[in-house]
Amino acid sequence: MRLKTFARCAALLNLSLLCLASNQFLQAQNSPVKLTIHADRPVSAVSPTLYGLMTEEINYSYDGGLYAEMVRNRTFRGDWSGVNFWYLVEGGNSAAKMEADKATGPSSALTASLRLDVQKADAQNQAGVLNTGWWGMAVKASTEYKGSFYAKASGSDMGPITVSLVSDDTGKALATATIASLTGDWKQYSFTLKTAAAQASASNHLAITVAHPGTLWLQLVSLFPPTYRNRTNGFRSDLMEKLAAMHPTFLRFPGGNYLEGDHIKERFNWKETIGPLVDRPTHRSPWNYQSSDGMGLLEFLGWCEDLNMNPLLAVYAGYSLQQEHVNPGPDLEPYVQDALDEIEYVTGSADTKWGAERAKDGHPQPFKLTYVEIGNEDQFDHSGSYEARYAQFYKAIKAKYPDLQLIATTPINNMRPDVQDDHYYVRATKNFQDANHYDKADRNGPKIFVGEWATREGAPTPNMGAALGDAAWMTGLERNSDLIVMASYAPLLTNVNPGGLQWDTDLIGYNAEKSYGSPSFYAQAMFGSHLGDHTLASTADGAGAKFFYSITAGAAKKKLYLKLVNAASTPQAVDIDLEGAKLASTAKLISLAAKDTQATNSIDRPEFLKPVDSSVTVTGGQLRRTMPQFAIEVIEFDQQ
Ligand code: AHR
């Protein structure tokens, strides 16, 4: 009996010792960070263009993504299985067959078409083709969809042509338009489909049918919903709104690997992406699908205009991914000339050759251009030709455009480039360890553009653990923004349907109907919309390996922006002492937090994690903020 009591007491003692120890552990974890900020001691400038967007055709970013075109494979490309994403319609007792026809097309760029041979059809028994869209076609009630196609027919009695948006579920037409008749020559026809009451859904398709036997050829079938700011050939509003929330100041385009192509002939050949869509031949992206090139050079510039971003133009520099390169010297000259022409298309007045071309394409006003990037990731060119290629482009571009800043895609030794593009794709742990990467970097070398970076954890979009890695890294970008003139997360977009993704961990996910921002997206939006123009002197005592911060001030609006990152699994108290400024007694707090690093958003739970706004009280320049576990926070102070 006594022994038992003794054993029980010993067990209890052990337990309490354990509790004491773990409390001490918690206590140690929780000891506050003492953060002292000297608002009257500026340290270094923050680049006004620090945050921007990097983009390319990957993960169905444009086709099936930002570019609002609803028809998939509008130019009727086929393979052994048939004409992709197009199917035959034989209503009632009608009979027809369809096939790709290489012998006729509406332009020298689109020399083929879809041939529909209708043996039997009448008004009640129509035959034709249907397109299934980008994993469906999103249709809403009371909405106008604008469409067009090129067509010719074997006889003028081939009309009328009926175009309908049809529900996959009910087989009912949600909107219909008719084209009275066709001719024997290629011609473009336009139509509007207006829905009445309809359940918003992506389970719909587009059907084009006829009520008469004969032969019909079709090419470039297109359908657009209302676009962001009603831009013709424009962009999906939901995605543009998300991008706008990031407050991006520049757009790096058109890539990335997409600029280079797998082979030289598959590079982003900008001259084949301008003008009417019917004059764009389309091309294969290195991400293994055909690009419609609806997003051509002028559309990228329009995107910049819509979101008030500076274009950062990447020009093809003579290297393609399958180790094909163009020798520097005379062989490279046509590519250098192409880049000069491209810059003229962007910046030249309407009385220059390529400026006139841009005016003809609908934009007489030149665009402002500051940065041109020469190639992409040329460290992968095993021939070692980049230094000479960069130098050749540099000399020619500077001779004509001395004010342009020319970005090198990898460190080079034979000269000092204006700017160097560094890329980082890492795990969160690496970003925690490397958040001070640029703290001691040479300030006499080239300026830095962190043109691609991401914490790669989570698929298809990053989870909270990744967002914490991102936020830690961004505190380092801000601290070193006297050197780092620009930075852009990559990749930006992914279609989340099966087969839509080529690269894990993309900032924003979507299907045909809906989109969502990942925790990393919210981290970007929080940082991008709270950026001062200089950093302030500060010290942090007692900060552990998973605590990060950045303090910047905006002179014009008299704001101080404090970003805090607690990547630990326990709460973190922070005693903040702001000296040298008279502050308002309340400050705005924006907090993004999760219970676990694996917590995330998805197409079905788009806002499981999102920032929450509140306010905190500031007394005599001081406040204690206890951050939750796994948290990214911004405190915006007003100076009086
Ligand atoms: O962002 C995905 C790819 O990563 C880019 O196309 C390329 O530049 C990099 O290797």
Image (tube, rainbow, N blue to C red):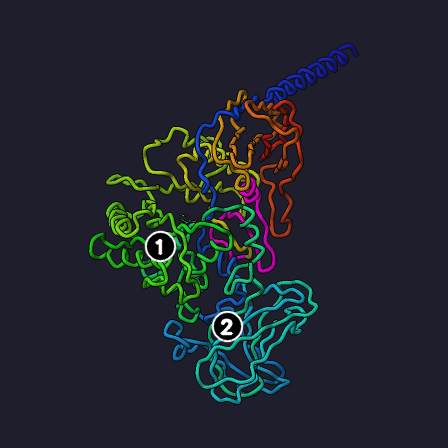
The answer to whether residue 611 is visible is yes
The spot of residue 509 in percent (x, y) is 55, 52
Quadrant for the N terminus, please: top right
Q: Of all residues shown, which one is farthest toward the left?
A: 330
Which quadrant does the C terminus fall into? top right
The single residue placed furthest to the top in the displayed view is: 2
The residue that appears at 47% across and 35% down in the rendered structure is: 478
Q: Secondary structure at mark 2?
A: strand
Q: Name the secondary structure under disc 1.
A: helix
Q: Which residue is mark 2?
A: 221
Left or right for 470, reference 624: left
Highlighted magenta segment, given as a residue range:
498-526
Q: Nearer the viewer, residue 160 or 217?
A: 160
Q: Where does the image place residue 397, in percent across and percent down from the top left?
A: 28, 51
Disc 2 + disc 1, Cβ < 8 Å: no
Q: Where on the picture, by quarter, is residue 9?
A: top right
Answer left or right for 141 relative to 356: right
Q: How many marks?
A: 2
Where residue 208 appears, as percent x and y from the top left, is: 56, 77
Q: x, y (%) of residue 256?
A: 40, 51
- Mark 2 vs mark 1: which is more N-terminal? 2
Residue 25 magenta: no
Query: Disc 1 residue type?
Result: Glu
Q: In the rendered structure, which amino acid carries the disc numbered 2?
A: Val
Mark 2 crowd level (few <14, some 14–19, many ≥20, 10 Å Cα): many
Residue 503 is a magenta residue: yes
Q: Quadrant of residue 345?
A: bottom left
Badge number at residue 260: 1
Question: Dot 1 surroundings within 10 Å: few (below 14), some, or many (20 or more)?
Answer: many
Relative height, residue 526 to residue 32 (above, below): below
Residue 58, disc: none
Up the image or down, 377 lies above or below 431; here it is: below
